[in-house]
Image: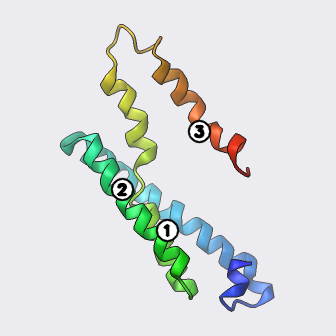
Amino acid sequence: KLIRDIGVTRGDVGHYAGILGSSYYAVHILTIFHWSQLSNHIGRKPVILTALLAIVISIFLFGLSKTFLGLVVSRIVCGAFDPSDAVVKSMPVDITDATNLSESACSRLLACLPHADTCVGPG
């Protein structure tokens, strides 16, 4: 419905929805390693807070977009500034040591988190 509302014809909706959906992941895969290295140098919290601010701005701009190009650019910005996959998964290693890493609640919770979103929202 979003793609149709910005003026894309009925036959091309799937094509443009695919471009919109894949633009996030295409940029995300190119930038995730850089975010991981940056978090090792300056710390996890500054990286997560910077990314959170950029993602909030990106989602706000996505909601205000009236053209397809605006939608794609906001998704690209969101994908470029989302280091949560690598950075958050490395945080339990930082807060535990070798003696309690396997028994920690963090490691068990971290194994469940990627699947929690399908229980809460649409899959």
Q: Is residue 95 above or below residue 33?
A: above
Which of the 4 quarters of the picture holds residue 96? top left
Badge 1 amino acid: Ile
Q: Specify few, some or many for label 1: CA neighbours under 10 Å numbering under 14, 14-19, or 20 or more.
A: some
Q: Nearer the viewer, mark 1 or mark 3?
A: 1
- Quadrant containing the N terminus is bottom right
Q: Choose top left, top right, bottom left or bottom right for residue 17.
A: bottom right
Residue that badge 1 annotates = 59
Amino acid, disc 3:
Pro
Q: CA distance from mark 1 to mark 3?
A: 21 Å
Percent across and percent down for residue 61 are 47, 76
Other residues around mark 2 within 10 Å, as few (<14) / some (14–19) / many (≥20)? many
Whichever of callouts 2 and 1 sits on the residue coming sooner in the sequence is 2
Residue wearing tag 2:
51
Q: CB of mark 3 within 8 Å of CB of mark 2?
A: no
Q: Secondary structure at mark 1?
A: helix
**Distance between the Cα atoms at labels 3 and 2?**
19 Å
First of labels 1, 3 by sequence position: 1
Alpha carbon separation for disc pair 2 and 1 = 12 Å
Q: Residue at x 56, y 87 (%)?
A: 66
In the displayed structure, 110 sits above or below 122; it is above
Question: Which residue does the numbered mark 3 point to in the structure image?
Answer: 114
Q: Position of residue 49 (x, y in %)?
A: 32, 51
